Amino acid sequence: MASRASAVARALDFFDTNGFRDRLADLVAIRSTSQDPGHEADVQFYLNDAIRPWLERMGFTVAIHPNPSPGFGPILTAERIEDPGFKTILTYGHGDTVRGLEDQWRAGLDPWTLTEEGDLWYGRGSADNKGQHALNLSALEAVLEERGGRLGYNLKLVLETSEERGSTGLRAFVAANAQALAADVLIASDGPRVTPEMPTIATGTRGTYHFDLVVDLRPGGVHSGHWGGLTTDPAIILTHAVGSIIDRRGKILVRDWLPQNGVPTAVRSVLAGCPVGGGGEAASIDPDWGEPGLTSAEKIYGWNSFIVLAMVSGKPDNPVNAVAPNARAHCQIRYTVDTDADTFMPALRKHLDEDGFGHVKIENAGIRMPASRTDPAHPWVKWTVTSMEKSVGKRVQVIPNSSGGLPGDVFVDHLGVKLIWIPHSYNGCKQHGPDEHFLKGPAREGMAAFAGIWWDLGEPGTP
């Protein structure tokens, strides 16, 4: 007789006998990067040849649509409608990856070949996001087999291929197809857990806001011997301007950028005791960096951060004896929904002017991905926690938003769904850089968790 326990066991058997590893290897081998030109056919192949037949075998009706924004990757939609009266679940993933960076991977590794070393599966897209959506669909396949081809609910999927280019076109596509994509909740996977060992649910994401700071003083460089000490150095002005925005220990000094009422009580409550870490050799937590008085979890999941992503003056790779004519810094704010992004640049302009940096220009300012959040106490969140804890046998940590960016706002704004993000990766996975990998322990737990979720959605008791 079909049972939840058997469905979870079936999914784990597929994982433990290397069925999932081999499936992931096939997906990683497809060079579906959206960031390097010349891979348009690979992106199309990923959707049409790798994903579409698999979904159709599971009873989905599949369509592949051109992106509303010319020059960006196509979007796959799929649906399994068992009864219009049933609840409808929406899931999401992205089949595109960042560029391969082939020359930067360590010896013995290739971004387009899955390489197993101990508990790690190396390969581009293994963690972001091929491994994550493929794992969820593999768990679904096990549940369908256990239930004899029925779920007891309707399921829809959006799989885009321009996420690594800011999900360009996705908002317009979802807005134009809101009726066809209507659902009760979004349950999907991307991003890292709070630690590798801690199953995690994120109910939103921080937004990303970018801008350039520019000091442009003269048409060209002037001799550093003849003019050094006499004429203004734009690099010095720019570094002092940045120093007026954030202090040497990472505290943001433009206080109008921050949540005006501090960390909300509901956010602080859910983050009490939340661990943060697992970056491995990639990074370390510096306890004295950032906003004083906040825990590490509050800093990354409940507060805003300012980062200088790039800064240049002159030609660092070929310096000459000249005072450079200009300097530029590309900056980013990661922000929660508790802050109005429309106030960022007016507040910065006022701050720079008051500090004597009126000649520092702000250019190319705007939101790349808006922030989003579902109330961590929402019934859908509590239901998912209960389901996951039953499957994995340990506590699940809820965070109000993940630290990175995802297009959850698109689905909230146009479909009105609640957000349940269940990440299967960890902070040290090296996504977006060389040596990206999927960690088998969290992946295996994710397989069990989603098998349980897909099963429980067909049972009484969902919100």
Image: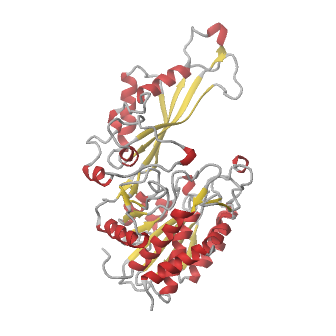
Corner quadrant of residue 358 = top left
Corner quadrant of residue 73 = bottom right
Give the quarter of the figure containing the C terminus.
Answer: bottom left
> Going 44% across and 27% down the picture, which residue do you hit?
248
Say above or below: 39 vs 280.
below
> Going 57% across and 73% down the picture, which residue do you hit?
15
Q: Nearer the viewer, residue 166 or 398?
A: 398
Q: Position of residue 84 (x, y in %)?
A: 38, 84
Residue 247: tell me if it is visible: yes
Q: Nearer the viewer, residue 127 or 165?
A: 127
Q: Position of residue 186 (x, y in %)?
A: 41, 67
Say above or below: 457 vs 127.
below
Q: How is the image coloured?
A: secondary structure
> Going 38% across and 33% down the picture, which residue do you hit?
252
In-image side of 435 versus 176 (left or right) = right
Residue 94: tell me if it is visible: no
Q: Position of residue 34 (x, y in %)?
A: 63, 56
Q: Position of residue 81 (x, y in %)?
A: 45, 82
Q: Nearer the viewer, residue 205 or 279?
A: 279
Give the quarter of the figure containing the N terminus.
Answer: bottom left
Total labels: the figure holds 0
